């Protein structure tokens, strides 16, 4: 289990231009942390660094279990990630995606793919290809995967992007039910997203 993430002076440059100058913080279980900042401050970049999709130019990100660093090859097992820019395989049907995902990482509470489908609220689209989903339906599917996989670190970048009011209510309720014993990060400038957080990390412009 992953129970602590430590960021120590994490920074990233593209050429000579710093995207993130220096971020130091500790992320712990049962804490929902918001990452806020103006456009271009590096919110999504920081999420990608934590997820391992980008390497920092400086500083370190440590993933710990009871004070012991996790092996690099095991970190992905403990992490789930949802963002509008993260693609899902368009040729798969929704139920196929859930069945496939469940073979890669187990679901929370030993849910089956069919039970996950019901929790997503997208059961009417079970046999529909993901490429034919609206942007809101795609985002809802991504959030379902991130929140219901059996992971201890959940990264949510702009989680309510493309969601209507009904879907936003669904997201808040699902997050509330599945945030215990997890480290959750939300990167957003939406007040309603940040209002869900226990603490907020403000990135400078």
Image (cartoon, rainbow, N blue to C red):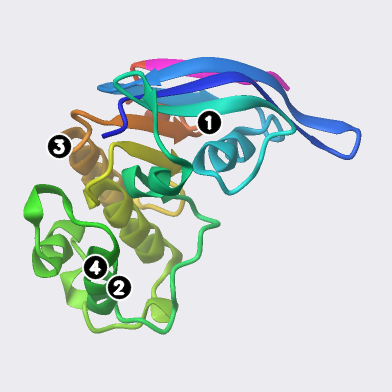
| Image depth: mark 3 or mark 1 in front | 3
Specify which label sits upstream in the sequence, 3 or 4: 4
Q: Position of residue 57 (x, y in %)?
A: 74, 33
Q: Is residue 180 above or below residue 74?
A: above
Residue sitting at x 29%, y 83%: 128
Mark 3 to mark 2 CA distance (whole Å): 23 Å
Mark 1 to mark 2 CA distance (whole Å): 30 Å
Specify which label sits upstream in the sequence, 3 or 1: 3
Looking at the rendering, the stretch of residues picked out in magenta corresponds to 199-205
Q: Which residue is mark 3?
A: 177
Q: Position of residue 26 (x, y in %)?
A: 45, 16
Mark 3 to mark 4 CA distance (whole Å): 23 Å
Q: Is residue 126 above or below residue 3?
A: below
Say which element carries label 1: loop
Specify which label sits upstream in the sequence, 1 or 2: 2
| Image depth: mark 1 or mark 2 in front | 2
Q: Which residue is mark 2?
A: 97
- Pointer 1: residues within 10 angstroms few (<14), some, or many (20+)? some
Q: Quadrant for residue 92, please give it.
A: bottom left
């Amino acid at each position: 289990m992953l129970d602590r993430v430590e960021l120590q002076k994490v920074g990233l440059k593209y050429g000579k231009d710093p995207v993130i100058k220096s971020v130091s913080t500790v992320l712990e279980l049962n804490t929902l942390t918001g990452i806020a900042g103006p456009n271009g401050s590096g919110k999504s970049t920081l999420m990608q660094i934590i997820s391992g999709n980008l390497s920092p130019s400086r500083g370190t990100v440590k993933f710990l279990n009871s004070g012991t660093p996790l092996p690099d090859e095991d970190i992905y097992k403990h992490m789930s990630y949802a963002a509008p820019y993260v693609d899902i395989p368009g040729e798969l049907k929704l139920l196929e995606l859930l069945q496939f995902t469940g073979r890669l990482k187990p679901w929370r509470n030993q849910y089956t793919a069919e039970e996950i489908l019901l929790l997503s609220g997208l059961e009417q689209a079970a046999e529909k290809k993901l490429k034919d989903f609206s942007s809101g339906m795609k985002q809802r599917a991504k959030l379902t995967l991130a929140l219901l996989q059996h992971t201890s670190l959940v990264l949510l970048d702009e989680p309510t992007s493309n969601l209507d009011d009904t879907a936003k209510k669904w997201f808040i309720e699902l997050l509330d039910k599945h945030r215990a014993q997890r480290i959750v990060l939300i990167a957003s400038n939406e007040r309603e997203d940040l209002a869900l957080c226990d603490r907020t990390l403000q990135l400078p412009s």
